[in-house]
Image (spheres, rainbow, N blue to C red):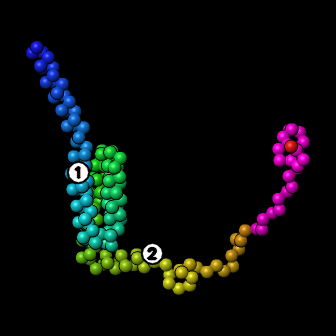
Amino acid sequence: MFVRRVRATLVAMLVATSLFVGACGPIEYVNTVTRGASSAVEAARTANAAKWSPYWWTRAVEYLHQAREEAAYADFQAANRFGRLAEEAATKAREEALRRAGDPEAAKELDMMDAARRPASHGSGGLAPVTGDDETPPPPRPMAPVTDDGGDGDDAGAEGTP
């Protein structure tokens, strides 16, 4: 009788422990992604990181998106990993954005980079005109007529066959 009671208690404890351990992924996801990474990305957004730190901003936003996507597939280990990466990138984006926003030289550098990326406003929408194009393809060659080789017995597609 005593052995059965101890065995039942052990089984109940084992089941409770396995349920608790199995539920750690979603709990950690809430802490890592929902609270940590989302808050860090929002802090970077308020620092205007999209303008002042585009690399780290893009990285943070994409990692956060990937973390949420992995959680949707119930892969909480991957979601937590992407959440940590998103939080790190968002922190770096915020720090860099605040540093660059206070530095006039960095603002000039970003303006020059933006000007280099923008297409020229003259001509045909920023594209260079085509002049003296020597690499025009040759005209297509006429196709040779198809002849029956007569030896394989495959007359599919030949005229006059049923």
Place of residue 29 in the rendered image (x, y in percent of width and height, measured from the top left): 25, 49
Over which residues does the magenta segment extend? 138-161
Can residue 140 be seen at all in this image of the molecule?
yes
Query: Can you name the residue that lies furthest to the bottom here?
Result: 122
In the foreground, 9 or 125 = 9
Q: Quadrant of residue 161?
A: top right
Query: Where does label 2 land, which residue?
Result: 117
Would you say residue 156 sits in the magenta stretch? yes
Residue 64 relative to residue 20: left or right: right
Q: Which residue is located at x 32 percent, y 53 percent?
A: 68
- Judged from the image, the secondary structure of the residue bearing numbered disc 1 is helix
Q: Which residue is located at x 85 percent, y 52 percent?
A: 146
Query: Where does label 1 land, which residue?
Result: 30
Place of residue 44 in the rendered image (x, y in percent of width and height, measured from the top left): 26, 66
Residue 117 relative to residue 96: left or right: right
Number of the label disc, if any, that sits on residue 47 = none
- The quadrant of the rendering that contains the C terminus is top right
At label 1, the amino acid type is Val
Place of residue 100 in the rendered image (x, y in percent of width and height, measured from the top left): 28, 73
- The quadrant of the rendering that contains the N terminus is top left
Q: Which residue is located at x 22 percent, y 47 percent?
A: 28
* Alpha carbon separation for disc pair 2 and 1: 39 Å
Magenta stretch: dominant secondary structure: loop
Query: Taking 95 as reference, is 23 above or below it?
Result: above
Residue 111 relative to residue 24: left or right: right
In the foreground, 45 or 16 = 16
